[in-house]
Image (tube, rainbow, N blue to C red):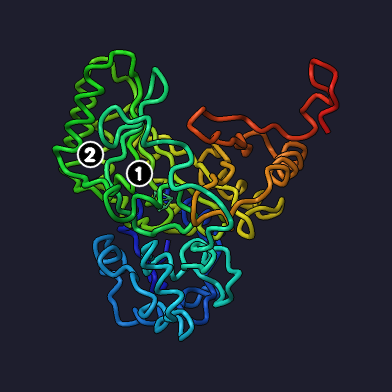
Amino acid sequence: MKNINGRANRKLLPVGVDRGRNKKRISSLPKRPNPVLGGFTGGKYLGRGPWEKVSVVQWDDWKWQFQNRVRSPLQLAAIMNEPALSSKRYRSVVRAYPMAVTPYYLSLLYSVGESDPLRRQCFPDFRELDDSLGGADDPLDEEMAMPVPGLIHRYPDRCLAIVNSICAVNCRHCNRKRMWRGKKKSPGTREWLQTMAAHVARTPTLREVIISGGDPLLLSESLLNWFLGTLRAIPHVEVIRIGSRAPVTLPMRITPELCKMLKRHRPLWFNTQFNHVREITPESARACEMLLMAGIPVSNQSVLLKGINDDYGTMRDLLYGLERISVRPYYLFQCDPVRGVNHFRPEVFRGMEIMDKLWHNISGLCLPRYVLDSPGGRGKISLQPFSLLPERTPSGATLF
Ligand code: SF4
């Protein structure tokens, strides 16, 4: 494995990984021929744009990446050499929905074109302010299902704890955009977590706790360790699940120390969100491998996003890529009808067509379940490939 400067960096590999096999597998992952932001092309390092002088040690340090996130349209315009990105309209989008992109994620952009699927996930877009596209701040009524602040308790056996509101990259398609600012923000304090843990402790039917956010891996390691330990000490909690996009947007966050700490709280499951094959890089593959080596199964929950991954070839390449790095495709979510996100929503039939083709062409190991979270918090609906549906309903009506 090579570091960002193309030099061998043996230290980055997790202990116990077969270096020969790993090198071969990782070297088959996509390179980054980005003319503006730098990266590798033909095995040659081209530079890192504004971060050219940053040392490799800094680049590989998640705290440096986090502190140097691009947060303003002005900064983005200067980096991309696109003055239009600093216009008043873009600034108003960012006032409503703040932006944040790590230098690492920005370095994955191939082209400066607006249709780049990674750019679309992290650059502000005017359509976010177009309310005529519809959508609600909280279409799944998560706020209505909270017995204590931040804890969504909808099903008898499991609940979801929103531990903070901070992410490495503010994904423009996020279904919790309402939490990026104002009163809905989760403070991520010990008191906040303690209240949620107390609810879990007094509810014996809860056997599984999903820790989400924001990004739980952006809590301090000692606080996360304390929260996991507190949950683990509750006799009826059997399983803990962490939802984090860090392997995709800030893979340096997966450190040996973090893995060692997480390992203590097993059985622990980890769900992440790769939406495009180009997000599978040597760095993200290594992050997932480290979690797997710590005995933590890693699954993926993609979101079907218009113009990003809503075609058969792109989705197939993503699923193949996940299988190559031993990450199990778990869910493919139909994008929720969230205010400021609706320009990303494909037709449900589009997703069903894609699933139909996937079903007939790729290995079952690569197949996620295509689901729609029904508005109002009535749970998930499984969307089957067309060809698996009966042509008629039990009452005899023709379906399609
Ligand atoms: S990482 Fe998850 S919670 Fe954070 S912005 Fe992206 S989709 Fe939303």
Q: How many marks?
A: 2
The residue lying at 43 percent from left, 69 percent from top is 106
Can you tell me whether the CB of the residue at mark 2 lies under 8 Å from the nearest atom of ligand 1?
A: no
User: For the point 34% across and 50% down, which residue is it?
Assistant: 179
Q: Let me know if residue 147 appears in the view.
A: yes
Q: Position of residue 368 (x, y in %)?
A: 60, 37
- Residue behind label 1 places its C-beta within 8 angstroms of ligand 1: no
Residue at image point 44% right, 57% down:
171
**How far across and how far down the image is residue 173, in percent?**
49, 54
Q: Earlier in the sequence, mark 1 or mark 2?
A: 1
Q: Amino acid at mark 2?
A: Met
- The answer to whether residue 31 is above or below residue 195 is below
Q: Is residue 47 visible?
A: no
Horizontal side of residue 351 vs 9, given as left or right: right
**Left or right: residue 314 compared with residue 30:** right
Helix, strand or loop status at disc 2 = helix
Question: Dot 1, crowdedness within 10 Å: few (<14), some or many (≥20)?
Answer: few
Question: Residue 115: percent from the left, percent from the top?
Answer: 61, 69
- Front one among 268 and 150: 150
Q: Is residue 65 above or below residue 84?
A: above
Location of residue 253 with respect to 53 vertically, above or below:
above
Quadrant location of the N terminus in the rendered image = bottom left
Camera-side residue of 48 and 67: 67
Q: Percent x, y for residue 114?
A: 58, 73
Q: Which residue, given by chain and number where applicable, does mark 1 sit on?
A: 16
Q: Is residue 92 left or right of residue 359?
A: left
Closest to the observer: 10 or 165? 165
The answer to whether 191 appears left or right of 376 in the picture is: left
Residue highlighted by disc 2 = 261
Tell me the SS state at disc 1.
Answer: loop
Q: CA distance from mark 1 to mark 2?
A: 17 Å
